[in-house]
Image (cartoon, helix red, strand yellow):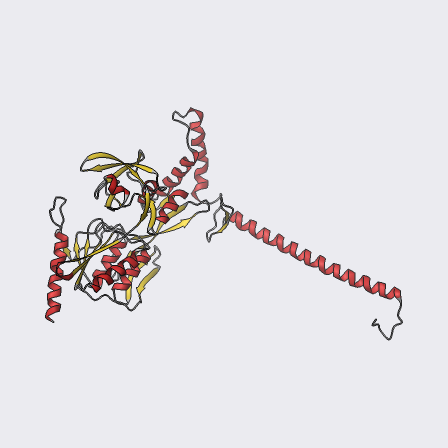
Amino acid sequence: MDYDNNRPFSSEGAVQEHKKKSNLGKGIVIGVVATILVMGLVMSSVFMAFLRKGYLHIGTNGQIYVQDVGTSDDDGIGKKVESKLNALDSLLGDGFYFDDVDDEKAADNIFKAYLAAYGDKYTVYYTPEEYKSMMESTTGSFYGIGAVCQKADDGAILISEAYEYAPAYKAGIRNGDKVIEVNGEDITGMDLSVAVALIKGEKGTDVNLTIMRNGEKMNFTVTRDKIDIKTVSSEVLDNNIGYIYISQFDDVTTDQFKEAVNDLQNQGVAGLVIDIRNNPGGVLKTVVDMLDYILPNGLIVYTETKDGTRQEYSGSDNHELNLPMAVLVNGNSASASEIFAGAMQDYDKAQIIGTQTFGKGIVQTIRPLTDGSAVKYTIAKYFTPKGQDIHGKGVTPDSVVELPDDATEDMQLNAAIDYLNGKMSVRAAE
């Protein structure tokens, strides 16, 4: 045993030394525990403060969500209208004539009406079911009827393309039909994504659609199935002219488009028609990637917010498609289709043929909420590389060619073929 040579050893001193060490150890443990407790209290206080301020939300699934904008029950217009909504609810009371009210549905309709009150038809509220369905619709695979839907001017949902291999076509629905009711619910004036969410559903289930065709109301029952969307189709026309039709810009479209171009080039095409008529748009990244593949490196599209903040989307893949090209458009070519046509026009990369496009030149973003619902709202306006403002105006074709409903041939496609034959002849002579 070691000990201090200057101090005589005693058993009493050893006991005192042991007590000192024991007390020191207890003190350290108590200090650590106290520190942990204090830190816990501080963290709890911070957590509760952020929760009260609305930066943290606990979702219905138990997860904790963090958002960069603080909100609480004391904030915003909701506090101002809450008392009146409750008064109206009390007013109806037990004397309301109609059947029992679905409180959840009533609340959803209030949320939808609130956003509609801002006057922007592209700013909408999605229920959890609608949001899930809407997100699935951009992946290229979902359960539904197999048709490309678009908003018509009269508020109905236009069937711009019914896939021949899919349930809608097999049930008798055709291109140009307008859906006005889904399972007996009037959808005229409803947001496109919300209406599509009603049409889609689980595999094997039925959906009843009421459509208008040439002024006649018709009813169809369609059995939903899994739909693997083929957004791009292609073929070789006479005189080695390639033809590509793009129905919409989904996540799968870029790869399908590149595959179609490569296949046509392997077949020796000397010119290319890209048909985006009746294409309602889709994913911004998809159309940017496709244009990056076609155009030289450079600006493709840019957006500007209300305060003038600009964001540019540019191509940089060092790939360019060097073929005479024509792009077909019409009044149902919207959003991402207009980005496509506008960029091709600004770079003088293709002749734009057809009629004035739809004129949707604004950008939306989607913010999910803690209960699984979401809000899509407008955040910016987009412009073509040379600064064309498309919103409310559309893209003006280089060559305006009408296509009457009773046309017996596709004059717009014929015009594109004539244009390419002329360009190919010039190239052959050089």
Q: Quadrant of residue 109?
A: top left
| x then y, percent, for residue 196 | 32, 43
| x then y, percent, for residue 124 | 35, 45
| x then y, percent, for residue 60 | 49, 44
With 96 as the anchor, is 168 left or right in this view?
left
Residue closest to the eye, 107 or 265: 265
Q: How many marks?
A: 0
Residue closest to the eye, 344 or 136: 136
On-image quarter of the N terminus:
bottom right
- Res 70 seen here: yes
Residue placed farthest to the bottom in the image? 5
- Res 137 seen here: no
| x then y, percent, for residue 285 | 33, 58
96 relative to 249, above or below: above
Residue drawn at the location 13% of the way across and 64% of the way down: 423
Residue drawn at the location 84% of the way across and 63% of the way down: 16
On-image quarter of the C terminus:
bottom left
With 46 as the anchor, is 243 left or right in this view?
left
Residue closest to the eye, 55 or 321: 321
61 relative to 31, above or below: above
